[in-house]
Structure formats: structure tokens, C-alpha cells
Amino acid sequence: MQLDMTHGNISKHLIRFSVPMVLGNLIQLSYNALDSIIVSRFVGKHALAAVGTANPIMTIIILGISGICIGASVLMSEFYGAKDYAKLRQQLSTTLLFGMLFSVFILFGGLLLAPVILQLLQVPANILGEATLYFRIILFGFPFTFLYNALAAALRSLGNSKTPLYFLTFSSLLNTALDVVFVAIFGWGIAGAAWSTVIAEVLAGILCLIYIYRHIEPLQIKRDEWRFNKALLKTTLNYGSVTALQQAAQPIGKLLIQGKMNTLGVDVIAVFNAVNRIDDFAFTPQQSISNGITVFMAQNRGAKQKERMQQGFFTGLRLETIYWLFICGLILLFQRPIMEVFVSAENQNLVEMGMDYLSLMAFFYLWPAYTNGLQGYFRGIKKMQTTLVGTVIQISFRVLFVYLLVPRLGLTGVAFASMLGWTVMLLYQFYSYRISQKQINQIMTR
């Protein structure tokens, strides 16, 4: 199931890689919604609030894990493209060993400081106990979360995005089933929800490791290969830290935007949260195509195929455009029933408010199609700082325009602010792309 992207049909490679990632992300989004529904229905609003207060901390930790794994995956893709399997295993060994140390540090630090951290976040006293319990239990799963993410990144660096999907699907289904058993049937409350997540994470990580040692020879680290490579670790942390910061910029910006929307009343808040969920589903395939571009660029960079890199990048942008045409048509045709999934049809004024937003965003989704495509390109050629600067520029201008436009235009002001933020980001990316083209020949000779 490995996919060598250094030869063969480029479009087929990108589609074969991206589709499983799209499905995996959609499954994850659907599981998160189901998890909240189960906790809310069988435990109550206080438990749901407790889970919500712990989520920002968990998100930050996961961003750290994700950043390290993305940095490692770019290097592993390059080594795979160059057919340097010994270096590939050194990179995986270094990532896993560092990941275990990092996870253990987070585990014990979190267990000790959980109440203090939650109090600093001003968690209400009436849910502090439940939030602390939930957070402490969840921490036991983080070593296995890192294990799964690192192994999934390694598989994707080989072009294999299907196998991580299988394990993610298994984990999500198991998590949902255990939620029902532990929370709805056994009545274990918020602890049951936490333990179901931990068990699913443990099994996903272990089963992924077993699969690799049975089927994926290039990733099978031998006993004498389990060691740190200081040079690789330094490069991984350099790329990983920049990527983590880049990913963290978005939720920070969204938090600032949410603060502005919270001043407009409950109706606007409800509709804003609904259209945000729709945006998440719309953006997911764009981000998956971007990840495909990253792996394609890195593999062909390792193989020193400059012309194929360019062909792959432009093919990826064409796929982004085709997807935009599809999602634009879908939103315009079905915006009312889509809104009524999230907002009761009885509240027609709220449905209409959401439709006004979606009728604009259907066209504006073209902008992030290209920004995501360019982000994938820059990651693939190791220009991580460019992705960070681009994201910071986008979210900064987006927040600025939200504060300027929303008081005058309401929710549609968010749509225009998003478009303007993406426009400024594209201008920066096009400038950076022109510079990168001048440097490509030097990159190829390293």
C-alpha cells in the first residue's frame, strides 16, 4: 500500500493519497460531535462544560504532537523519495524516542499541575473537580496518541494514507461504543468518557505498530537502530516547532473572533457556531489535498526531480479548484437544508442569517483552496517559516477586519473578513513562491 510518487500519474497519486485523509478527518469531526451528544445527554450540561474547559489544553498539547510529527514526516518523505531507507528508520526512531520522553513529561507534569492550570483558565468552581478528573485521565492516553500520530505520519510519508484511515476509523468506532457502554449503560459519568478515549488511543497506537512490523519493511526499526540522531532531532524540532506555532495561530485567532461575536447576542452566537461547523467540513478536503502536495513535493525533492515537483504542485492546485467548484455548487443548492441540520427550521430568521453567510462563503472557499495548496508546497520544500508567516498574516488581518466589519454587517462581515485575510495571505504566498523558484536549483543540488 506504499505509494512512490516519484513516477507515475500525478493526479491519480494525489487523489489516492487525499481521499483517505478526507474520510479520516470527516470521521474525526463526526466522532467529536457524537462524543459531545453522549456526554450531554447521559451526564448533563455540567459534564459537557467540564469537557469543554479541558479541550483547549488538550488542543495545545496535540498541536505540539502534530507539529513534531509533520516536521518528521517531511523528512521521512524526502528520505523515502531518495530510497535512503536507513535514514528513514533513523528519523522514525528519533521521533518515537523523543515522543515518548515528551509524552511522559506531559503526563506527569499534567497530573501534578492539572488543578492549577484549570484555575488559571478560570474554570468555574462547580465544574473544576470534573474537569480535573477528565483531564488527568485523558493524559494517560497521550503517549499512545503520540505513537499513533508518529506512525501515521511515517506511513503517509510513504504515500500510504489508507492504513492510518483504517486505524482512525477503528479507534473512533471503538471510542463511540465504549462511550455508550461506560457512560450510558454503566453510568461512569465523565470518567467513563475519558477512559473510553484512552483505551481507543492505546489500541490504535499498538495495532498500528504491529501492522508496521508485519507489513512495512522500510519502517521496521531493528534493535541496533533504536537511538537518537541529534542532527535529525534538531531539524525535526525546528520544523515541528514552527509548524506547531503555525497551527496554534488559527485557534488563537478564532478565539479572538469568538470574543467579538459573543457581544452580538445569543442568536448570532448560535448561527456563528453552526456555520463554523459547516466551514470545518468544507475546508477538510482542501487541507487533505494540501497534505498530498506536501508528501509529493518532499518525495520528489528527495529524488531530485525538479520538473515533476512543479507538475505536482500545479496538479494539486487544479484539484483544489475542481473541489471548490463542487463545494460551491453544493452549498448554493442546499444551503437551506444544510442550515436546518444545525438550526431548527422554526427559527427562520436564524436560518436566513446562516444562508446569507454561506451564499458568500461558497464563492470565498476558492481563496483557502489556493492558500492551502501553497502551504502544502512550502512544507514540501522545507519552507516551514513561510507557512507560519502566511498563517499569522491571514489570521491577523482576518481578526482586524472582523472587528471593523461585523459591527456594520453582522455575520456576513465575518465572511468578508475571511476573504480579505486570505487575500493578503495569497499576496504574501505568491511573493514567496517567486523567491522559492529562484532557490529551487540550489535546493536540488544539496
Image (tube, rainbow, N blue to C red):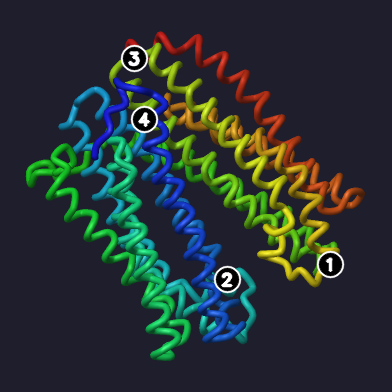
**Mark before the other along the chain sequence, 2 or 4:** 4
- Considering only vertical position in the picture, is 17 above or below 60? above
Return the x and y of residue 215 as percentages of the image width and height: 15, 46
Say which amino acid is labelled 1: Gly
Would you say 417 lies left or right of 190 here? right
Return the x and y of residue 237 as percentages of the image width and height: 38, 40
Residue at the image position 26 percent from the left and 37 percent from the top: 230
Q: Nearer the viewer, mark 2 or mark 3?
A: 3
Residue 157 visible in image: yes
**Mark before the other along the chain sequence, 3 or 4:** 4
**Mark before the other along the chain sequence, 1 or 3:** 1
Element type at mark 4 = helix
Q: Nearer the viewer, mark 3 or mark 4?
A: 4
Element type at mark 2 = helix
Say which amino acid is labelled 3: Gln
Residue at the image position 63 percent from the left and 35 percent from the top: 325
Residue picked out by circle 4? 13
**Mark before the other along the chain sequence, 2 or 3:** 2
Residue at the image position 24 percent from the left and 55 percent from the top: 208
Residue picked out by circle 3? 305
- Considering only vertical position in the picture, is 358 above or below 180? above
Would you say 45 lies left or right of 164 here? right
| Crowding near the residue tagged with mark 1, few <14, some 14–19, many ≥20 C-alpha atoms within 10 Å | few
Q: Quadrant of the N terminus?
A: top left
- Considering only vertical position in the picture, is 25 above or below 297? below
Residue picked out by circle 1? 265
Residue picked out by circle 2? 52
